[in-house]
Structures are given as structure tokens and as C-alpha cells.
Amino acid sequence: MHRLHRQVAARPGDTALDDLVRMARRMEPGLGASEAEATARHVVTRVHGLGPIDPLMLDPSVSEVMINGPGPVMVERGGRLHESEVRIGAADLEALVDRLLTESGRRVDRRSPMVDSRLPDGSRVNIAVPPVAVGGPYVTIRRFVLVDADLADFGPPPVVECLERAVADRSNILVLGPTGSGKTTLLNAIGRRVEPACRMVVMEDAAELRISGPHVARLEAQPANMDSEGEVTMGDLLVNALRMRPDRLVVGEIRGPEAVDLIHALSTGHRGSLATIHASGPADALRRIELLAVGEGRSPEVVAAQIRAGLDLMVEVERLEDGRRRVRTLAELNGGAPDSEPENVYRVAER
């Protein structure tokens, strides 16, 4: 198998499976047809795929793959962690890291021991290696699984009606919730209710949204290359988006200095915009945006006033134990004083 692996790895492009089967049988005359095919598939997986974790990446029930050094591979299914049947050895793990970095053009070493990248299918990858990863390398892959959900999947008719009315009224909507709660999925569902003639400029750190239309422009931030050049931040995208004659702005996630420009844009007439933020509730979301903006040197009072002038509807989404997502809270701002709190117009009854 090692000889076949070396030959396949040295060849440019892909090699037909039938050719690999014949090569395997020439190298190991004692192999039967089924054994030779299994060997060929095994080698192809390691050279052109993601090695032992390929079955997990093809499993639609797996939302996250976590490797904590050589040993068992952990997965998330339905919001819960499980130990998978897959185990990975040190050599395969090293090859996997190399393969993931080849896909992204990034590098990881002692000088730069942590890296984020993205697979061609949109899955997010984080890699950490020693010395920061004690017992590593650690690999975390958050799979991009396209969920074609509708607004009705997130709540009863009053929730759907409120969201539809907000879109029609060109309200600025902020979707919030913890990791994995369904913020991106809900934003997709809201975006599909926007009129087709509207020009939307979508900005994301990693392209995940699937909002389509004749006037949708999608921008994606870019990390610096190995020479520390070419970085394009979310703030850069937002500044450029404002020059693209947008009817609506869509920000995949507010997480950094771009909060300043977004707040200014929302409070100065860019109606009907959409964004998400990682937060535990409407009040927490306000605090997080305020901290991000104040951290860029803005006056707390001015920031608070602009947020309340720019945001109209806050939508808190949560993930239930059975994996379903639902809207937990709808809260309106309606302007108000800089210290005013969001007013709930809908909230799931506590049990």
C-alpha cells in the first residue's frame, strides 16, 4: 500500500480507480479483486480526500468534527458530542493537517501555531499545533451543511408574520444567539423573503449564507497570505459595500471593528439591513455591539444612541435538545434613550 500511495501522490491530477486497482494487483499479485479495489479506494482517500475522516465528512448528521491529537475522533450530532468509530493515528493526522492547509494555501508551524481556513464546500477549519496545542495537533472542522429552512420552521404564525412585516417595512434586523443556534439558517430564511428587485450586498468572514437573486453581490473577507499580505477584513468589505449602491446590507456576523461602520450605516439611512451576532439575549447583544464600537474609540453615549436609532428588530434564536431551532424572543428598540432596553414583543413561554 505504501508503494501505491507514493505513486499516486507523485502523479498530477486524479487517477482513475480502475487504473489504481490494476496497479495494486501488479504490486501485490496475491490481492483479490475486492481487496485490490478496497486498497485503491483507501489510497485515493488519503491522497485526494481527508483520509480516515472522509466518512464523517460525508455523513449529513455530523455538524462538527473534532480531533484532539491521535486517537478517537469526536463528532457533534444533533447538538451533542459523540465519540465516533473513527480513530486517527499520528501519521494520518499529520497528513490531514497538510491536506487541509494545501486546500487553503495557509501554513501552521511553531511561529504561527494556530490557523483558520475554509474548505471548498464552505466548512470552517481551525488547526492548532504544538507548542500551544499540548498533545496536538488539534483539528476542528465545522461542517457547512446547507439547511433549507423556512420562517415557519422557527416559530408559530405570529413569529412568521412579525418577521415578514419587518422585511416588508425595511426594518433593520439583528439575529442573535449562541454558536450553533441557527443564526445563519434563519438569516437565509429571512433573506429569501426580500423582494427580488432589491440590491443586497452580503458580507461574510466565511461564505455560508445562500441568499440568491438577480441583484445579490457577495463579498468574503480574506486572511493574510504566508507573506502577511492581502488581508481583507470585514471592515474593508463594509466600506466597499457602501460604494456599491446597496439597497440592503447583510453582515454574516458582527464580531470586530466593522461594528462601528455598520452602526453608522444603519443609523444614517440604510434601511432593511440584516446582521447576526453571537449573544445570549437582546440586552447582551446591545452590550456586545457597544463594547466593540467603544473599543474603536467611539463615545459610549453616541454609540448607544446610534444603535437604538439604527436597529429595529432583534431576533433571538435557540437550539433545542432535539436539534430543532426556534425563535425564542422578538424584541423591538423603537429608538429611545441611550440606556433604554429592548422591548419584547414575543417570547417563548418558560416551562
Image (cartoon, helix red, strand yellow):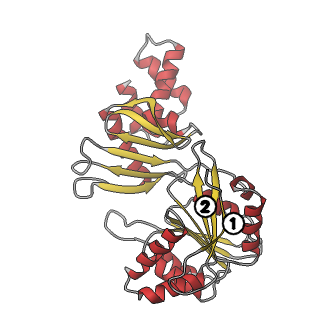
Q: Using the image as rendered, state which of residue 192 and residue 1 is in the foreground.
A: 192
**Residue name at image x 58 percent, y 60 percent:** 183
Q: Which residue is mark 1?
A: 191
Residue density around tag 2, few if under 14, some if 14–19, many if 20 or more, within 10 Å: many
Residue 140 visible in the shown view:
yes
Label pair 1/2, CB-CB below 8 angstroms: yes
x, y (%) of residue 139?
38, 45
Relative to residue 266, is residue 12 drawn left or right?
left
Label count reads 2
> Horizontal placement of 271 versus 63: left or right?
right
The x, y position of residue 263, in whole percent, is 53, 82
Q: Is 107 drawn above or below residue 87 in the view shown?
A: below
Q: Callout 1 environment at 10 Å: few (<14), some (14 to 19), or many (20+)?
A: many
Q: Position of residue 288 (x, y in %)?
A: 45, 72
Q: Amino acid at mark 1?
A: Gly
Q: Which mark is residue 209?
A: 2
Q: Secondary structure at mark 2?
A: loop
* Residue 182 appearing in the image: no
Q: Residue at x 35, y 56 (%)?
A: 115
Element at label 1: helix
Q: How far apart are the alpha carbons under marks 1 and 2? A: 9 Å
Question: First in sequence: mark 1 or mark 2?
Answer: 1
Query: x%, y% of residue 329?
Result: 62, 63
Quadrant (top left/top right/bottom left/bottom right) for the N terminus: top left
**Image disc number at residue 226:** none
